Image (cartoon, rainbow, N blue to C red):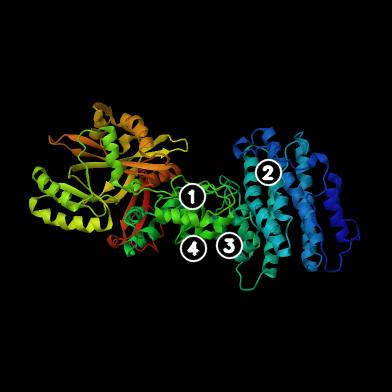
Amino acid sequence: MTVREYAESILLANTLEGKLAPPPAGMTLDPPHKGSYQTPDLPGRPELLMPRRSGETRTKIPSSEQLGDEDHRSVLLHFFCNHELIAVELMALALLKFPDAPDAFRRGLLHTLQEEQVHTRLYLDRMAATGTVFGEHSLSRMIWDHIAPMTSPIEYVSRLSLTFEQSNLDYANHYSKAFARVGDETTSGLLAQIYKDEIAHVGYGLKWLRRFKKQQETDWDAWHRSLAHPLTPVRAKAPGGIPFNREGRKKAGLDDSFIEQLQIYQRSRGRTPFVHFFNPNCEAHAAASAMGTTFQGNKASRHLEEDLEALILANGHPDDLALMRVPPSSAHLKTLKEAGLPLPEILPLKESKQLAKRKLGGFRPWAWSPEASDLFREFSNNPTKNTLHPWRESLAPELFSKELTRRAAEQLDLANNESHLFRDSGEALDFVKARIEHGPLLLKPALGCAGRGHLKIETPEAVPHAERWFGQVLRIQKSLVIEPLLSRLLDFSALYDITREGEARFVAFTRLITDSRGSYRGTQVGPKIGNLFPSDLTILFHQDCIEAGGEHFSGPNFYKRVLSRQLTELLPGYQGPVAVDAFFHRGKNEEPQVRPVVEINARCSMGRIAHNLRRKLSPDTVGQLTIHRRKDLAGGIPAGLPLNDPAHAQSFLAVWNAGDL
């Protein structure tokens, strides 16, 4: 019998004994020759071992914590046994599909096939000892479907040896220890043996990858190039909850660069990804669109986008995707991952057109401003069922402006709301002249955020400054806001999610950190209001401190019940995050008061980022996100976790801290 004949008997056998039959004595290696082999839809198998059909229930894989139960242990053994049997079949298929491969490659492949037969027998024996019959649980064909279409030996070693067998360096090592912890030393030893063999199998694949690849290619690039969609490097490591085994990969011969790139690599394992994008200059884009022009950013606005876009990594699920102008370095991504932040897949913005070929769950920009809609249209001509945002085609500038806040104040009939919107500089100037005698005023662009572009008019002598400011603002915007300049004590926000069903769901309160000019500098988040507000303001907040529509409400009741209902009326059709800014201030009698609605932001916010960071990194503690200017960091990088790479930050550095602040 020749190796080719033996491989075909293994592939097409319809009995388990036939699959695991050892090579006969005197078997010879076929001389290299050209030829092709028709890949079957599935290998031969007895009916009991056929993969589950579409619609059939999938057996759930038990967690490490469930292995104390023998039934759960048998399910896991069944799962691993199927993988070993598929490996035997795929190795037989590779021997048939590549008869012109080097003799040394085919001999190594035959040797590996025999070891996989041994692994299958070990699992079968162990299952028999637990009373489990192979085939009594569902069997997956996923690995076969990913690898069987291979067209070259380099694709074989890339897909099987360096992907699925590499992932077993995590699984076998982890579960060997997990079985030992529950007292099953027999299964623990079995997995320890398989782990040792898998190191050699990955080493075999690496050796031949290096032999087959282009000389100038790195191992990573050659391997990545040889993986066909939807197979990606994420399959070469176990999912979250199972430790990444760096030591095993080193023993297999993988270099540090390859291992680090794999460790930080992320892509969906099957869940349809949402695309996240950071566009913090949304207000400026909306203002320009309202004036019929296009926003032309300067260096500061560009640095804001490029420096802080790493913040959206906090928003995504590990199966999501982040579009980034300047993706972080591998070293910085490793720092974030080791800190415990689950990372989504990252795609350079210049490659966004690739998304037109992928199935996407939808687009989640920082804000639905004109440039986000334009970007979305670039990659949404897609036959797959992308979730289109209901406002993507007709975004009103009011979505980002103080007009929304003014309407909220009117509809809620908020007491002491003295915010006024103007579209004519003459009317605005007359208003300032008439009101400045009664106290200082704060002037704000209708489209603006984070305290940018504000002007304080505190005396009649400063009124000429207001006149010049009106001209500057109304040249680039249609409206502006004038309100009393109050003595602020503390700024805070209420976060909401507006669901697909049109309901506003309250998420959390956050505390804003501002400088003396009222510009945003950071956010504090915590499990309770008392973690964020001083005791006197906490007590006030829980009393009937907010008057709306002639009624008085406590802070929690107003935001969770009253305002949440109003948001759905103010934002018909909108779906996504909303942040409502507010503050405590000193009233005329010097007693603290609440100004409950200062600004409504129908977009993501720094508060939402801080909330997500706390939820993912330190859910039981107080956390703080701060934004630092590089020019103010002469004393060095602040303590904490830098969220964007300090080595490449141009103007801004975002830092996360948690615990005792």
Q: How many numbered marks appear? A: 4
Q: Position of residue 321 (x, y in %)?
A: 51, 52
In the rendered image, which quarter contains the N terminus? bottom right
Label located before the other in sequence (1 or 4)? 4
Query: Neighbour class for label 3 at 10 Å: few (<14), some, many (≥20)?
Result: some
Element type at mark 2:
helix
Give the labeled residue for mark 2.
188
Q: Quadrant of residue 76?
A: top right
Q: Amino acid at mark 2?
A: Ser
Q: CA distance from mark 2 to mark 4?
A: 48 Å
Query: Neighbour class for label 4 at 10 Å: few (<14), some, many (≥20)?
Result: few
Q: Amino acid at mark 3?
A: Phe
The label nearer to you, 2 versus 1, is 1
Give the labeled residue for mark 1.
363
Please state if 10 lies on the left or on the right of 65 as rendered: right
In the rendered image, which quarter contains the C terminus? top left
Q: Is residue 518 above or below residue 567?
A: below
Element type at mark 1:
strand
Label located before the other in sequence (3 or 4)? 3
Q: CA distance from mark 1 to mark 4?
A: 16 Å
Residue 22 visible in the snapshot = no
Q: CA distance from mark 3 to mark 4?
A: 24 Å
Give the labeled residue for mark 4.
350
Label located before the other in sequence (3 or 1)? 3
Please state if 541 lies on the left or on the right of 253 as rendered: left
Residue sitting at 66 percent across and 62 percent down?
A: 226
